[in-house]
């Protein structure tokens, strides 16, 4: 069992999400940066879809009530076990009574904590990902106790850590494909999409990232149609909205671009004010 002594800015349990339910209006959800979530699980030998704890900008303070093997990936922070600094991207042993603290993100935006066997929280519609009105809670609070599997810890651990590519946090280039309504844009608008530098708005969250810069828009709204994480919508006011993991399943704004999976992961690590450029 792992207890939240102090909640971070936004903590939740996520796996890779819910699938085959979008026709019923159920969002995918899942870890915002699935590369980092998978990496944490693979370092421990978990299935890549095992549930992890995701934190945003400021991590929680945790207490372990049983022995556990853990791994922390994603956003770089001041990670400590019992006030002693430890490394990320490697297997770490914690014992009953130990505390784990994260501090604020120094690089990136979202971090991930995996435990051997994955967190054993409620399974709803085939996933443990928290989402409002689907799971009992949509985020973790102080005092929450997270069940984990009983673990027999190995006597020795590999001391090597896995290096995350620098570009995962630092690149401004966001890889995209043409969206269904891309060809309805004028040639001038199409050129502007990949020549302008955009910045992440303060109105960004797990549902969508909004961009501050407005874009000339003369397109008519479309009939409500399918959207998915990574869809880039152009609103009537000319604002670009990039749908993220908790996005709705349908929308009526033109879908001018579509992010690759790698681009969604990298965008999830960008904070307010971060610059980005679209690249085909």
Image: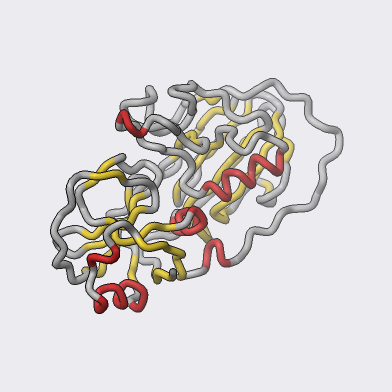
Q: Quadrant of residue 184?
A: bottom left
Q: Between residue 72 and residue 254, name the one nearer to us.
A: 254
Residue 145 percent coordinates (x, y):
52, 24
Number of numbered discs visible in the structure rendering: 0
Is residue 179 left or right of 143 when viewed as pictured? left
Residue at the location (23% across, 56% down)? 254
Q: Between residue 104 and residue 249, name the one nearer to us.
A: 249
Residue at the location (71% across, 39% down)? 44
Is residue 54 left or right of 239 when viewed as pictured? right
Residue 185 percent coordinates (x, y):
23, 69
Q: Quadrant of residue 151?
A: top right
Residue 280 percent coordinates (x, y):
44, 69
Question: Above or below — where is 217 with respect to 135?
Answer: below
Q: In the displayed image of the protein, which residue is found farthest to the right?
A: 155
Residue at the location (21% across, 68% down)? 214
Q: How is the image coloured?
A: secondary structure
Residue at the location (31% across, 77% down)? 191
Q: Quadrant of the N terminus?
A: top right
């Amino acid at each position: 069992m792992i207890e939240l002594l102090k909640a971070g800015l936004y903590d939740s349990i996520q796996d890779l999400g819910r699938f085959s339910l979008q026709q019923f209006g159920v969002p995918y959800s899942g870890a915002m940066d699935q590369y980092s979530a998978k990496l944490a699980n693979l370092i421990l030998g978990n299935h890549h879809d095992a549930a992890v704890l995701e934190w945003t900008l400021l991590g929680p303070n945790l207490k372990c009530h049983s022995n556990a093997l853990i791994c922390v990936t994603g956003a770089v922070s001041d990670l400590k076990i019992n006030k002693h600094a430890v490394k990320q991207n490697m297997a770490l042993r914690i014992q009953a009574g130990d505390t784990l603290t994260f501090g604020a993100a120094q690089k990136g935006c979202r971090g991930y904590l995996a435990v051997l066997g994955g967190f054993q929280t409620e399974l709803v519609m085939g996933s443990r990902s928290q989402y409002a009105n689907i799971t009992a809670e949509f985020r973790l609070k102080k005092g929450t106790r997270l069940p984990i599997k009983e673990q027999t810890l190995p006597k020795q651990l590999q001391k090597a850590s896995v290096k995350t590519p620098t570009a995962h946090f630092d690149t401004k280039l966001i890889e995209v494909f043409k969206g269904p309504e891309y060809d309805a844009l004028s040639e001038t608008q199409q050129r502007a999409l990949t020549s302008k530098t955009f910045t992440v708005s303060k109105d960004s969250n797990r549902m969508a990232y909004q961009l501050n810069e407005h874009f000339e828009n003369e397109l008519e709204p479309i009939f409500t149609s399918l959207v998915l994480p990574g869809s880039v919508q152009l609103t009537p006011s000319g604002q670009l909205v990039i749908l993220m993991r908790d996005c709705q399943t349908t929308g009526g704004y033109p879908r001018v671009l579509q992010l690759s999976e790698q681009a969604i992961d990298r965008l999830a690590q960008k904070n307010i004010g971060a610059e980005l450029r679209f690249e085909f």
